[in-house]
Amino acid sequence: MAESTPPAGVTLRGVGKTFGDVTAVHPLDLTVPQGSFFALLGASGCGKTTTLRMIAGLERPTTGRVLLGERDVTALPPHKRPVNTVFQSYALFPHLDVSENVAFGLRRRGLKSVTKQVTEVLELVELGHLARRRPSQLSGGQQQRVALARAIVNRPEVLLLDEPLGALDLKLRRQMQLELKRIQTEVGITFVHVTHDQEEAMTMADTIAVMNAGRVEQLGAPAELYENPRSAFVANFLGQSNLIEAGISGTDGDDILLSVGDAKLTLPKSRTHAASTATGGTVLAGIRPEKITMTPRAAEADIPGGRNRLTGTVVDASFTGVSTQYVVKSPACPELAVFAQNAERERLAPGADVVLHWDPAHTFGLDGREDIDAGTGEDAV
């Protein structure tokens, strides 16, 4: 039996936003499944926060409709929409303790008996023992949990999160990523999360929409976006990629044959997203740094057959703890990144002549006309 499509929590139909002559969000169609954790990921100015604000009702779309479930809420003001928002600034009331901060929304709705709901949600965010403390007595992570509890206690249909972890230090931010995902799974509310942090989106979201210049570049599960990017922007913005300009020299069954100077590479047709793959054309052949194995040139004979290979020279080596990150200069590309896990492997020093090799199935192909620096920050220079 075919799996049924889950009901929609949020639907955007042709939703766009302009401010004068500036288009912040080009008309887009987007469906967020009910009960899922959905991330809008992109750099500053890409339109992700404007999109979130249109869902919240804080901005009115210039075009299109916003639906929550099957209800059209486009014309409804924020307070009449079944959504709550958690911002980077937690906006807690300093004169109220944790319990009263969480209860505030319930009391505004006229509820008098709120103890049970407040106690349950504080236990959910693991702050029950701090119910009588004031915000000034809490750490940043604890304040973030209070803000989250205050939003969840109202049981909204959709919870919107606008860079909620941005004010936390790195270690605490990573801890809270796991906590947010746990909480979302337990309460089952649809979460729509805006972030510029790729790791944050990858850690928490079921589905990610990568936004660029007011458009969705690619939509999908984190692993799919990472392993099979469809544009140079996604390949560079979501993690790190080596993109190599290569000529198409022919085909061999399910593979495209590429030439890069004297080197020959193989690219699966199923992982190619170029507009044309005709012989004589060009593609950007992509490979993630951790997919590459680096072998000293003197031991090249030990490399198994059937692998893609490029020669090069190590120009930089940085020990990061879990891995050593190399930069290799190659005739195929001036700078290739290679991440080698620290598993009793001898580290190679700058100046070493090496052969880079990888499984051809890990190669992806992008349109050769794309900006090879898109998504790196250097494309804006």
Image (cartoon, rainbow, N blue to C red):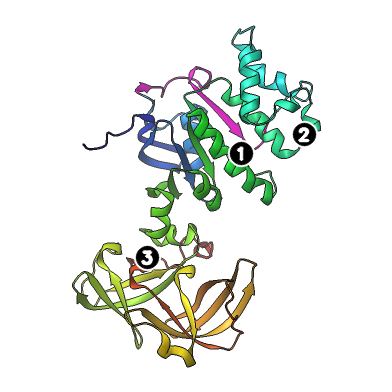
Q: Which residue is most to the front?
A: 344
Q: Residue at x 52, y 80 (%)?
A: 328
| Residue 192 falls inside the magenta stretch | no
Q: Which residue is most to the left?
A: 253
Image vertical order of residue 204 relative to residue 346, above or below: above
Sequence-first tag of 3 and 1: 1
Q: Which residue is most to the right?
A: 137
Specify the quadrant that holds the C terminus. bottom right
Image vertical order of residue 295 relative to residue 97, above or below: below
Q: Residue at x 66, y 21 (%)?
A: 102
Q: What residue range appears in magenta?
A: 70-90
Q: Is residue 47 visible?
A: no
Q: Type of residue at label 2?
A: Leu
Residue under label 2, please give it: 138
Q: Residue 42 placed where, x, y %?
A: 50, 49
Q: Residue at x 56, y 33 (%)?
A: 183
Q: Residue at x 79, y 26 (%)?
A: 134
Q: Residue 220 placed where, x, y %?
A: 38, 48
Residue under label 3, please give it: 370
Q: Type of residue at label 3?
A: Glu
Image vertical order of residue 113 relative to residue 42, above or below: above
Q: Residues within 10 Å of mark 2 (few under 14, many from 20)?
A: some
Q: Type of residue at label 1?
A: Pro
Q: Is residue 169 left or right of residue 180?
A: right
| C-alpha span from label 3 to label 2 | 48 Å
Q: Which mark is residue 164?
A: 1
